[in-house]
Amino acid sequence: MVSQRQLFLQHVAQTSDFPLMIEIEKAEGVYMYGTEGQRYLDLISGIGVSNVGHRHPKVLRAIHEQLDKYMHLMVYGEFVQGPQAQLAQALAQTLPPHLNNTYFLNSGSEAVEGALKLAKRYTGRTELISCYNAYHGSTQGSLSMNGSESFKNAYRPLLPDVRHIRYNSLDDLQHITERTAAVLIETVQGEAGVRVPQHDYLRHLRQRCHQTGTLLILDEIQCGFGRTGTFWAFEQFGIAPDILVCAKGMGGGMPISAFISSQEIMAGFKTNPILGHCTTFGGHPVSCAASLATIQVILEEQLTADVQQKANLFKELLVHPRIKQVRNCGLMMAAEFESFEVLKAVIDQAILNGVLTDWFLFCDNSMRIAPPLTITEDQIRDSCATILQSIDVAAG
Ligand code: PMP
């Protein structure tokens, strides 16, 4: 009989340079289980997706209940769908009052596309600015905003009138002018290897955008939904965006994304030509039900309350001559090694020992540590002991 692995290799487009080739049978809480009896403690969370853990019972219940009612009905928002309306309200309740209007999509890249279009439409301007080393997605527009040339070169020409500035550089804020429709920025840079905004950087950025009439779009696709210890990362930096983009952790494991803005800005999409943005599946009722339950779990189970404490425990335990530094914002963490080769050997060994981690797209010497927020102290201790042992075995 042909194995699943053979089918995978033959028929699934291979997009990873290093496929793990581990067949997963089940995932629950912070663990994934392989078909050969292996158990993995998940320190990746599908890159900030499983913030409430895999298959949280309340999320599962919401999905089942919605499945029993209806799935897809109709595109372009003709019908009132309860789960969508309730989710939009729940999102607004987590946000400053002006961010009260939500456009639902399916993936982070799609939400970024929508936000960029909205900014151009609302301001009537064309220039878009993002940061070096930023990751915003893989569709043509979102790809254009990525800050890594090597990822983009094969696809040129991309979106015109895109400019990059250095993250955390106050000097570079001068490049934002009355020509600039929007600045798109990750509140905390993810794929750059967890780069945290320096003191007051985001405040200065916010001010410059106000001065020039430029919209500030915060990409919280990776850092939102409790990951950094507040529901939204921007809450920690004393600013708010004009447009917020979110995805990943939003659906508790189901695909859903959104860009969120004010009634006034979002109205840019309602003026002629209408259908400023369209989606067939965006805001799917089952994903909305899952997302609503996810928000309730984060709030009711107070999952952000001990994020800093858990992150501090990781930092306390991850001390080894081979670890150069640990950067973090809450449980969005990066442990830096001297090279990719050393890190890769450590990661391979850790996986053999039952702990799942990886590296970052634009920072391949740093280990990604982003467990479900539900991880316990004991599980943190176990996973750190495994990582340290793996360093000794693989790179000692
Ligand atoms: N923005 C950020 C900050 C991300 O981390 C990602 C995904 N890694 C994206 C956008 C794109 O999201 P998606 O893969 O869902 O299109």
Image (cartoon, helix red, strand yellow):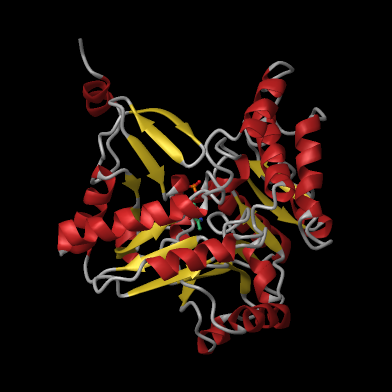
Which of 348/254 is in front?
A: 348
Q: Residue 340 in the image: x percent, y percent?
A: 22, 63
Outermost residue, front direction?
Answer: 378
Q: Is residue 322 above or below residue 47?
A: below
Q: Residue 141 in the image: x percent, y percent?
A: 49, 54
Q: Is residue 285 left or right of residue 31?
A: right
**Residue 345 lies in quadrant:** bottom left
Report if residue 287 is visible in the image: no
Q: Residue at x 61, y 73 (%)?
A: 180
Q: How many marks?
A: 0
Q: Residue 16 in the image: x percent, y percent?
A: 28, 43
Q: Residue at x 32, y 25 (%)?
A: 35
Q: Is residue 321 above or below residue 5?
A: below
Q: Residue 304 in the image: x percent, y percent?
A: 64, 57
Q: Is residue 368 left or right of residue 184?
A: left
Outermost residue, bottom direction?
Answer: 171
Q: Residue at x 66, y 21 (%)?
A: 64
Locate the C terminus by quadrant: bottom left
Which of 232/146 is in front?
A: 232
Report if residue 114 is visible in the image: yes
Locate the N terminus by quadrant: top left
**Residue 220 lies in quadrant:** bottom right
Q: Is residue 52 left or right of residue 13?
A: right
**Residue 13 lies in quadrant:** top left
